[in-house]
Image (spheres, coloured by chain):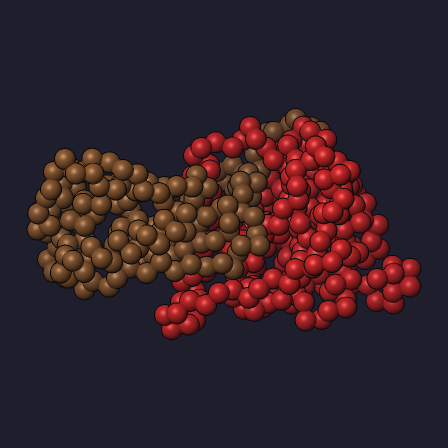
Chain colours: A brown, B red
C-alpha cells in the first residue's frame, strides 16, 4: 500500500464560498483574501469536500482537455501554493486503489458533452484588507442583519 | 478645531438605524449628545420595530428626528437616514453600540484640514453585552489603564467613521440587497474609486457583542455574506480592469498619536 498526501483546511479562521464559478477564500486571521476560478475553483471545492488528490485529478481529467501529466503538475503547484499561504495542510493517508484517469469518479454521473480547455489554476492573492481585522464581532447580528432583538440584559 | 472660535462648523447628521433596539437606544443617543458639538442633528430611523423604540426616541423630544419605515433591513434604514439628513457630514451609530466620548471633534478636524480626505475613521473596541463599557479611547492607553478590556481593532464598521455627504452622492448608499457586511461593501466601493480614507489612532466606536445571539447558522450566513462582498468587489475590479484585478487604494493610517 502506498501513502499519498491528502489535504485539509489548516486554519479555522479561513472561510470560503464559491459564487458563480469563482471561489473566494478569506483568511480572517491576516485579512488576506484569494480568488480561484476555473479548475482552481474545482480543486478547492473537491479538496474541502474531503476528496483525495487522486479523486481530484480524476475529475479534472474527466472535465478538461489536457494531458494528465499537465493537469497533475498544475494541481501540484496549486496545492503547494495553498500550503505556503497557510490555507491547507497536507496529511498523510493511505492511498485509495489506483483508478484510471479515464474513469469518471463516483460522484460524477455524466460525461460532459465536450471537454473544456484547461488553464493552469492561478491563486490570486489580495493584501489590501490586511490592515483590517476581520474577526467575528462584525458578524454579531441575527439572520435579518440586525443586532439580536429582544436582548434586554444591560451593562 | 476650536468649537468656540471656529467660524464655520460643518453640520453633522448622526444616523441611528434601529430595529427592536429599545433597551439600548437611549444610551446610544446619549453617547451622541455627549459630544457637545453644536451643529449636530440626530436621526433615528426605525425599521419597523415592534418594541418601545418609538417611545424611547420620543422621550428625547425635538433633539431627535424620528422616522419609521416598514422592515427593510439595516442598509435601507441607513439610506433613509442619508435621504432625510441635512448635514454636510454623515455619521452613523447602530442602536446597540456607543460613540466614545469626544470622538467627533478629532474626526471632523481631519475633514476640515484635509479636503482631499472623504472618509475619516477610528478603531473599534468590543465589549460583551452586560459587561462594563470600556472607557479608554487612545490605543496606547487602553492596555495599561484598563487591562481587562480587549485590544482595539480596526474594522470597516461604519459607526467608527465619518463621511462627506458628497461621497454618498458619488458612490451611492448602502446596498439594500445585502443583509450582512453592507458596510464592508460600501467601504470597498469607496476604495475602488480611489477615495482617500484616513485612519486615526483613536477608538471611536464601542461595539457591543451579543454572544447569546451568535448561532452557527447565522455565522454561516454572515461568512457567506463576507465572501459575497469580497467577490463582488473582485468582479467590479475585473470589469474595470478588462480582466485584470488591481488592489484597492491604500488606507492612510496615522502613525503618531
Q: Is residue B70 left or right of residue B220?
A: right
Expressed as whole percent of the image width and height from the top left, the position of residue A5 reads: 25, 42
Expressed as whole percent of the image width and height from the top left, the position of residue A1 reads: 14, 35
Q: Is residue B148 left or right of residue B232?
A: right
Q: Quadrant of residue A63?
A: bottom left
Of residues A7 and B232, the one nearer the viewer is: A7
Q: Is residue B180 above or below residue B7?
A: above
Q: Residue at x 15, y 49 (%)?
A: A58
Q: Residue at x 35, y 43 (%)?
A: A89
Of residues B24 and A87, the one nearer the viewer is: A87
Q: Residue at x 68, y 53 (%)?
A: B122
Q: Residue furthest right?
A: B4
Q: Residue at x 78, y 62 (%)?
A: B109
Expressed as whole percent of the image width and height from the top left, the position of residue B177 reads: 46, 52
Q: Is residue A91 above or below residue B120?
A: above
The answer to whether residue B252 is visible is yes
Q: Residue furthest bottom?
A: B242
Amino acid at each position: 500500500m502506498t501513502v499519498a498526501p491528502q489535504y485539509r483546511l489548516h486554519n479555522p479562521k479561513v472561510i470560503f464560498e464559491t459564487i458563480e464559478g469563482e471561489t473566494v477564500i478569506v483568511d480572517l486571521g491576516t485579512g488576506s483574501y484569494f480568488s480561484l476560478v476555473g479548475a482552481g475553483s474545482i480543486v478547492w471545492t473537491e479538496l474541502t469536500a474531503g476528496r483525495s488528490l487522486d479523486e481530484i485529478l480524476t475529475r479534472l481529467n474527466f472535465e478538461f482537455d489536457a494531458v494528465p501529466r499537465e493537469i497533475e503538475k498544475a494541481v501540484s503547484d496549486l496545492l503547494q501554493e495553498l500550503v505556503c499561504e497557510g490555507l491547507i495542510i497536507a496529511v498523510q493517508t493511505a492511498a485509495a486503489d489506483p483508478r484510471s484517469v479515464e474513469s469518471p469518479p463516483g460522484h460524477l454521473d455524466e460525461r460532459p458533452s465536450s471537454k473544456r480547455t484547461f488553464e493552469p489554476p492561478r491563486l490570486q492573492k489580495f493584501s489590501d484588507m490586511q490592515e483590517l481585522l476581520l474577526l467575528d464581532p462584525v458578524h454579531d447580528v441575527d439572520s435579518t442583519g440586525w443586532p439580536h432583538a429582544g436582548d434586554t440584559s444591560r451593562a | 478645531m476650536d468649537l468656540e472660535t471656529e467660524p464655520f462648523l460643518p453640520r453633522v447628521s448622526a444616523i441611528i438605524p434601529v430595529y427592536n433596539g429599545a433597551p439600548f437606544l437611549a444610551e446610544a443617543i446619549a453617547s451622541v449628545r455627549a459630544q457637545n458639538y453644536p451643529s449636530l442633528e440626530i436621526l433615528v430611523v426605525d425599521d419597523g420595530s415592534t418594541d418601545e423604540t418609538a417611545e424611547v426616541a420620543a422621550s428625547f423630544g425635538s433633539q431627535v428626528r424620528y422616522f419609521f419605515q416598514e422592515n427593510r433591513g439595516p442598509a435601507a434604514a441607513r439610506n433613509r437616514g442619508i435621504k432625510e439628513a441635512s448635514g454636510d457630514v454623515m455619521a452613523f451609530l447602530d442602536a446597540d453600540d456607543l460613540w466614545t466620548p469626544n470622538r467627533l471633534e478629532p474626526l471632523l478636524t481631519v475633514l476640515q484640514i484635509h479636503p482631499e480626505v472623504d472618509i475619516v475613521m477610528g478603531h473599534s473596541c468590543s465589549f460583551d453585552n452586560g459587561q462594563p463599557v470600556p472607557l479608554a479611547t487612545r490605543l496606547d492607553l487602553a492596555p495599561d489603564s484598563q487591562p481587562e478590556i480587549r485590544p482595539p481593532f480596526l474594522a470597516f464598521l461604519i459607526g467608527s467613521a465619518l463621511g462627506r455627504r458628497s461621497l454618498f452622492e458619488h458612490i451611492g448608499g448602502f446596498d439594500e440587497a445585502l443583509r450582512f457586511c453592507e458596510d464592508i461593501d460600501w467601504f470597498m466601493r469607496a476604495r475602488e474609486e480611489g477615495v482617500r480614507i484616513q485612519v486615526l489612532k483613536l477608538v471611536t466606536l464601542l461595539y457591543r457583542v451579543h454572544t447569546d445571539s451568535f448561532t452557527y447558522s447565522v455565522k454561516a450566513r454572515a461568512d457567506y455574506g463576507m465572501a459575497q462582498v469580497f467577490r463582488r468587489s473582485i468582479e467590479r475590479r475585473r470589469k474595470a480592469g478588462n480582466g485584470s484585478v488591481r488592489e484597492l487604494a491604500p488606507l492612510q493610517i496615522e502613525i503618531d498619536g
